[in-house]
Amino acid sequence: MKSIDRRGAMGLALATPFLVHGASAQSDWPTRPIRLVVPFTAGGGGDSSARPLAARMTETLGQNVLIENRTGGNAVVAASSVLQGQRDGYSYLVDAANQLTNPLLLRDLPFDYATSFVPVTMTARFPQVVAVRDGLPVRTIQELIEYVRARPGTVSCGTPPTAGSGHLALALLELRAGLRFIHTPYRGGADAARDIAGGQIDSMILTSSSARVPIEGGRARALAMTSTERSPAYPGVPTLAESGFPGFDMDDWNGLFAAEGAPASCIPRMQAAVAEACRDEVVQARMAPLGTVLVGNSTADFTAWLIRQREIVTQVIRDAHITLG
C-alpha cells in the first residue's frame, strides 16, 4: 500500500492510472493484521481498555488487531516505534496525556507530537476522583477547600505520577481555588490507594478504578470528580465543574493516533471500528466495573478537544511550575 500524504492527495488525484490502482488498494484495507502500540505495561488501565476494544475491532475489520506494549521514555519509545515504521495504515499509537505534556516536560524530543501524529478518536476516559482519608474532618469538596486554605502547605495529596493526569488535576484545582497541598507523587495508583487507606496521606486524586478499594472499604471518602459529567461508578459524587469550578475537565484518557502520512482513507474506517467497539454491550459490561467510560468520538471532535486541552495543560504546567526533575 502506498503511503499518501494528505497534503499531496489533490496532486495524486490527477494521475489517473495511479488513482485507480491506489483507490483499489486502499478499498481492500485491511488485508493483514493491524498493530496498536501501547506505551503502558500489560494489565494497566490503558492496556486493559485497549485489549477488549482490539478484540471487538478484529471482528469488525476482519483482520487481527494486535496489542504491542512498548514501555519506556515517558511513552516516547512507543511513539517513536509508530513513527519509524511504515506509514501504511497498519500501525497506530494508543496514547494519553503524554501527547500534550511531553513537549513541555522533555528536552530534545526527536519529533513534534502536534505535527507527527494524526488524531483518530478518543478511545476511553478514566474519570478521576478527589478523595480524603476517613479521619479527615471534611465531607464535601467545599469543606476540603476551606480546610486546606486554613492550613496551607500542610495537607498532603497523592497522585500517580509526577506530571500525570492526577497531578495536572491537582495543580488546576490549586490554581483555580487559590490553595496549596503538599503533593505526594506515586509510581502507580495502587500505591496511593494503599497509603490513603493506611492514613499516610490526607487526600488523593486517582482514577475511579484505582480509588475503588479504599473508598468501598470505608477508608476514604469520595468528594468530587474531575470529569465534566458525573461518573457512572460514583453517580452520587458531584463534579468539580458543578461545585464552583465551571468547565473543570481533567480526566485521564486514552486516544488513538496515526502517524502523519498514513493513508487518509484509513482514518475514518479506524474511527468507525473503534466507535462500534465502544458501543458494544459486551465490551461496555467489561469496562463498567472499572469506571472506564468508552468514547469513540468523531475525529473532528477529538481533534477539537485536543486543541482545547493542550491550551489548558500548557497553562497549568507553566503556572504551577511542574517539572519531571
Image (tube, rainbow, N blue to C red):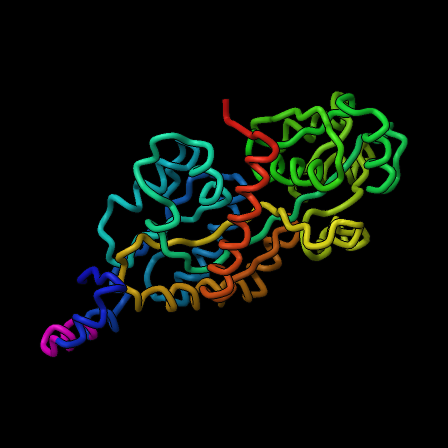
The quadrant the N terminus occupies is: bottom left
Rendered residue at 78%/27% (across/down): 202
Total marks placed: 0
Q: Position of residue 77 (x, y in %)?
A: 35, 36
Q: Against 68, is 88 above or below? A: below
Q: Position of residue 141 (x, y in %)?
A: 82, 42
Rendered residue at 74%/25% (across/down): 156
- In the displayed structure image, the side of residue 19 where residue 246 appears, left or right: right
Between 284 and 305, the one nearer to me in the picture: 305
Q: Where is residue 20 in the image (x, y as percent from the top left)?
A: 15, 77
Q: Main secondary structure of the magenta part?
A: helix
Based on the picture, tell me whether residue 21 belongs to the magenta stretch.
yes
Based on the picture, tell me whether residue 191 belongs to the magenta stretch.
no
Between 298 and 207, the one nearer to me in the picture: 298
Residue 155 placement: quadrant: top right
Between 129 and 197, the one nearer to me in the picture: 129
- In the displayed structure image, the side of residue 188 where residue 243 appears, left or right: right
Rendered residue at 33%/49% (across/down): 116
- In the displayed structure image, the side of residue 148 where residue 37 appears, left or right: left
Q: Where is residue 164 in the image (x, y as percent from the top left)?
A: 56, 36
Q: Against 4, is 288 above or below? A: above
Of all residues, the one furthest to the left in this rendering is 17
- In the displayed structure image, the side of residue 298 where residue 316 appears, left or right: right
Q: Against 310, is 276 above or below? A: below
Q: What stretch is highlighted in magenta?
A: 15-23
Q: Against 223, is 259 above or below? A: below
